[in-house]
Amino acid sequence: MKPAAFAYAKAHSIEHAVELLGKHDGEARLLAGGQSLIASLNMRLASPPMLVDINDIAGLDRIDMTDGHVLIGAMARHADVERSSIIAKHAPLISRAMPHIAHAAIRNRGTIGGSLAYADPAAELPACMVALGAKLEIAGLQGRRVVAAEDFFKGMFETALGPNDMLVAVHVPAATAQTRVGFEELARRHGDYAIVGLAAAAQVAGAKLSDVRLVYFSVGDAPVRARGAESAIAAGDIDGAAAALSKDLLPTADLESSAEVKLHLAGVLLRRVVRQLQEARA
């Protein structure tokens, strides 16, 4: 199929992009990597009156360190993040997740901001951002604001972005010598959406883990923190953490598996990821 007719404009700055969005009563769409948008246009699941191309906005693909945080611009391509030495050193959880995202051709075009703004509940990056306590910088008609990742993802394909808002960057607290991270997902084939996935981060002191954050994806409408399991892990009770998942998670059946299978797999991933959290950081 071919998309319905639409107008096209190329934004020259963040402010220009927001202005263009505002002129179309929130109906315009931003064009970044286009890996989800173009497909939805072609299937006519979306028919915006205008696409605002943000690919030429200078500096929007920046990956850098600033004030103890890793700054990832919204237009940073997945492939660039995957290859970044800054990400590998200071945000290792994201490095672990990147190879699981789709396929190389998609990672070459897809963007960090596009993935987060799309908010697919089966996607890896939203869960990683919640696990890391990241903050998302948003530009809108009233200026800029910062939203915690845990408050950004509202539901299935739903975020804190307003109709005239644009995601500008992500600010991720830089890992320290005490930081431990873990990532696992189970999919039928590499590159497929996960049946169940888990992104985790913690701090270590001696043999104990603290500030444990276990964030599951593909088990709900948004990333899900397993808070009961987090408390059990911090107390050193792995069996108790696995048992707590029956209350922490309420997965629903889909075309891939039943709710019972998803819950069982969540427990399998929990034990794998906890072993990763207990490993000494390289």
Image: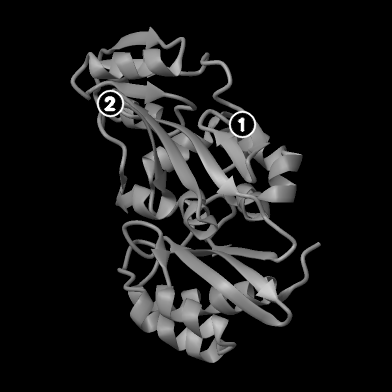
Which corner quadrant holds the C terminus? bottom right
Residue shown at the point (39%, 33%) measured from the top left: 138
Q: Secondary structure at mark 1?
A: helix
Q: Nearer the viewer, residue 64 or 218?
A: 64
- Residue 262 lies, with reference to residue 1, above or below; the image says below
The reply, left or right, for residue 152 in relation to residue 92 is left
- Which color scheme did the rendering employ for the protein? one colour
* Residue 51 at x, y percent in the picture: 34, 17
Q: How would you rate the neighbour count of disc 1 (Cα within 10 Å): few for under 14, some for 14-19, many for 20 or more?
A: some
Which corner quadrant holds the N terminus? top left
Task: Name the residue tied to disc 1.
Answer: 108
Looking at marks 1 and 2 on the same chain, the residue that comes earlier in the sequence is marked by 1
* Residue 187 at x, y percent in the picture: 53, 61
Residue shown at the point (43%, 19%) measured from the top left: 14
* Residue 178 at x, y percent in the picture: 71, 66
Residue shown at the point (73%, 80%) measured from the top left: 206
* Residue 123 at x, y percent in the picture: 46, 51
Task: Name the residue tied to disc 2.
Answer: 164
- Residue 123 lies, with reference to residue 85, above or below; the image says below
Using the rendered view, name the quadrant where residue 257 is placed.
bottom left
Residue shown at the point (74%, 73%) measured from the top left: 279
Using the rendered view, name the quadrant where residue 54 is placed.
top left
The reply, left or right, for residue 213 in relation to residue 140 is right
